[in-house]
Amino acid sequence: MSNRLFYAFDKDREFWLAALERAKFFKKNKISETEELQNKQVGLLFFEPSSRTRWSFEKACLNLKLDYMVSVVDQNTSHSKGERDEDTLELYLNLGFDLVVIRSKENTALQEVLKSYPHVKIINAGYGSQAHPSQAFLDYFTWTTEATSLSAKPKLLILGDIKHSRVARSHIRLSKILSYEVGLLEAPGFEVEEELKAAVVCFKDRKQALDWADLVMPLRVQKERHFEAKKWDFPPLRSKELKKDHFLLHPGPFMRNEDLEEDLIHDKKSLIFKQKENGVSCRMALISSMLKECEENKP
Ligand code: CP
């Protein structure tokens, strides 16, 4: 089994289903597996801003009673002297952690560095527009545990700025492993690449898309990744557009009245705050699964 959780497909169905059961256990018990994970050290390396992902990984480490270190690459690091991200990453991978959690912008030089350290366990906590597998997993965990009226193969509609969304790309990949359907309603000019579309249902008509869906996930307009000036012409999701049996998700951070109408945030169809809460138990499950694999893979 690969010691990387960079893309959803780095792990097989068996891994993800076992992680789901572990996350359910941690949600109920919120306790560590002290004996099994004792003396393990985790580094959390953040090149990019984060609130919910970083704090839930930190809290997951606390709950697991792990030794961990949070490292934010900012003006107080040698980044301010011009050190490149790939050199910072290489430095970090040499510090001797059992597992490193990384958030970064897209940078192929970082992926090249990771290839040179195949023995270091890695969890991707968000990589540019490309992948955010732990977010897709916690979304899946949330509807599986909270929306029990859903069919065995629920339909997830993702709408808005798909082009810049690592969450959308991770759902497209995870849906093939965990058997759910993904539909896209892309904002004009903010479409995902064609090769990923082969695996999803693409809609042009907003009403048709919403009629199709069980789960509705508007995305934030990810302006920090808009490198070319493009006109944004996509209305926020409105209360009146949701059906009685829809469930609402949002990976966060949500922008009121830009991604979705403010009233929807606390609507009874909304699982948004369940997603925030579940981030901790899901990340506990992923960290502990990876560290246990580490034990199993030892010569
Ligand atoms: N969903 C998500 O990645 O949120 P943060 O940027 O706050 O971590």
Image (spheres, rainbow, N blue to C red):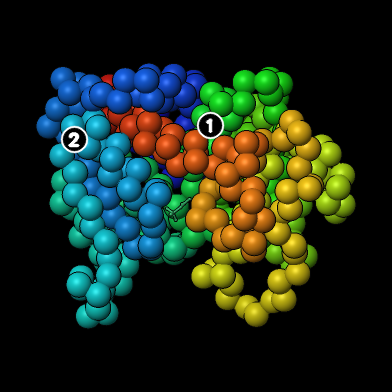
Residue at the far left in the pictured view: 39
Q: Position of residue 43 (x, y in %)?
A: 23, 48
In what element is the residue under mark 1? Answer: helix
Q: Which residue is drawn at 83% across and 51% down?
A: 206
Asked whether residue 290 is in view, the answer is: no
Q: Is residue 112 left or right of residue 199?
A: left
Is residue 278 or residue 289 the one in the foreground? 278
Q: Residue at x 14, y 27 (%)?
A: 38
Q: Earlier in the sequence, mark 2 or mark 1?
A: 2
Q: Is residue 58 left or right of residue 125?
A: left
CA distance for labels 2 and 1: 25 Å
In what element is the residue under mark 2? Answer: loop
Q: Is residue 22 left or right of residue 155?
A: left
The image shows residue 109, relative to residue 276, as above or below, that is below
Q: Is mark 1 within 8 Å of ligand 1?
A: no
Q: Position of residue 262 (x, y in %)?
A: 62, 55
The image shows residue 106, relative to residue 95, as above or below, that is below
Q: In which quarter of the image is residue 129?
A: bottom right
Is residue 130 or residue 242 the one in the foreground? 242
Q: Residue at x 65, y 27 (%)?
A: 179
What is the quadrant of the N terminus in the image?
top left
Q: Dot 2 corresponds to which residue?
A: 66
The image shows residue 193, relative to residue 208, as above or below, that is below
Q: Dot 1 corresponds to which residue?
A: 142
Q: Where is residue 292 in the image (x, y as percent from the top left)?
A: 28, 25
Q: Dot 1 surroundings within 10 Å: few (below 14), some, or many (20 or more)?
A: many
The image shows residue 220, relative to residue 134, as above or below, that is below
